Amino acid sequence: MRLFIAIDFNELRDYFVELQELLPKNAKLSLTKTFHLTLKFLGEVQPDKVNTLIDSLKKIKFEPFNAFLDSIGIFPTENYIRVVWIGVKPEEKIIKIQKQIDELLKPIFKKENDFKAHITLARVKYIEDKKQFLQQLKNIKVENKKVEVRNFKLIKSTLTPKGPVYEDLAVFDSD
């Protein structure tokens, strides 16, 4: 089964949809329907390994904290735009959780190299005019909305023709 570990941001779903409506129209985009910050993508995991994975993730320790939306950005570069995202701060607190997960799972899963705390708004298929697209993106102002981070989740992702379907397998609460 295809798994990842994430912090849920769906309580701001309506706001993210508003932001998606502001995205430039001169591009073919695949808009995300659920909103989370991926701490680690695990990929395909055998079903018999899930309980061991859950037991390992229970060892992660963190205090609850407030996370705030930051600015809009793109991956990987301005010349090759594949993802439009919203940054989250304070990034240090998120990175601290992510590094614990990475360290704990390093015997089984590859370590993250370029982790960036973000929430995907859209995947980019095609852009007519990159310069115009980037200028319009820069004009989108992101409100400093707050989410209280009290847990993270192990999520199963099933790919379907209508997009991924997510199922929470386990929730790991803060101390």
Image (tube, rainbow, N blue to C red):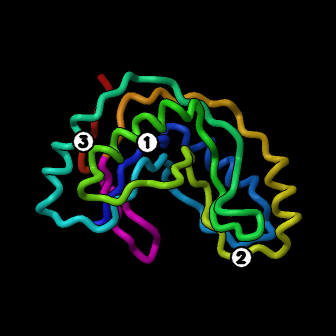
Question: How many numbered markers are drawn?
Answer: 3
Numbered range of the magenta stretch? 154-167
Q: Which residue is mark 3?
A: 57
Between marks 3 and 1 in the image, the one whose residue lies nearer the viewer: 3
- Residue drawn at 53 percent across, 32 percent down: 92
Q: Earlier in the sequence, mark 2 or mark 3?
A: 3
Nearer the observer, 54 or 159: 54
Q: Measured from the top left, where is residue 65 in percent x and y?
A: 46, 23
Q: Measured from the top left, where is residue 53 in percent x and y?
A: 20, 50
2 and 1 marks in contact (CB < 8 Å):
no
- Under tag 1, what secondary structure? strand
Does residue 169 lie above or below 149 as drawn?
A: below
The disc placed on residue 126 is 2
Q: Which residue is mark 1?
A: 8
Q: Earlier in the sequence, mark 3 or mark 1?
A: 1
Marks 2 and 1, how far apart at CA: 28 Å
